[in-house]
Image: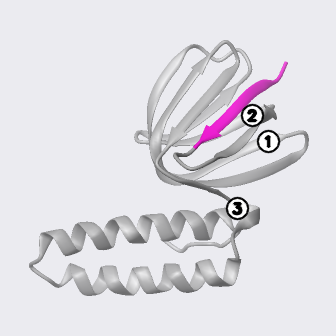
Amino acid sequence: MALTVRVVAPDKTVWDAAAEEVVLPSTTGQLGILSGHAPLLTALDTGVMRVRAGKEWLAIALMGGFAEVEDDEVTILVNGAERGDAINLEEARTVYNEAVTKLNQASGSDNRQAKVQAERNMRRARARFQAAGGMVQL
């Protein structure tokens, strides 16, 4: 039995199809969803969602939001989302490296707002880079 998975951002529907498995970046860690999963409502963190449709896995960068699971339907409402296969890997790598540099610079500052913004930008850039297939060293 398959799941029906919908990923909806404010400006578009990023994914609306059947899938066998979904891995979500919840605020408490990675969350796997299979057919027959118990009803669930969870907050999502900025990160990479993985969807298995057939034998292929698709990565989607999510920019935070919520997911609801009920009756083999997974509805994901997010602030922003982008399919990994639509992201240019080299461009995403450049943006990620720049975001890490800016975060390091902001970390030495007393400006709390700059630190928070730099962290948010780095997390978004990291999610896009990983969804595109990039590897991030921790």
Q: Residue furthest front?
A: 11
Is 4 a magenta residue?
Answer: yes
Write down the residue under mark 2.
21
Secondary structure of the residue carrying tag 1 is: strand
Compared with residue 37, is residue 101 higher up or lower down, i.e. above or below?
Answer: below
Quadrant in the picture for the N terminus: top right
Write down the residue under mark 3.
84
Cα separation, mark 1 vs mark 3, equals 13 Å
Secondary structure of the residue carrying tag 3 is: helix
**Residue name at image x 60 percent, y 29 percent:** 75
In the rendered image, residue 54, in percent from the top left (x then y), is placed at 90, 39
Write down the residue under mark 1.
52
Quadrant in the picture for residue 84: bottom right
101 sits left or right of 9 in the view: left
Sequence-first tag of 1 and 3: 1
Cα separation, mark 2 vs mark 1, equals 5 Å
Which of 14 and 64 lies nearest the eye of the viewer?
14
In the rendered image, residue 83, in percent from the top left (x then y), is placed at 69, 57
58 sits left or right of 33 in the view: right
Is 124 a magenta residue?
Answer: no
Look at the image and give the residue range highlighted in magenta. 1-8
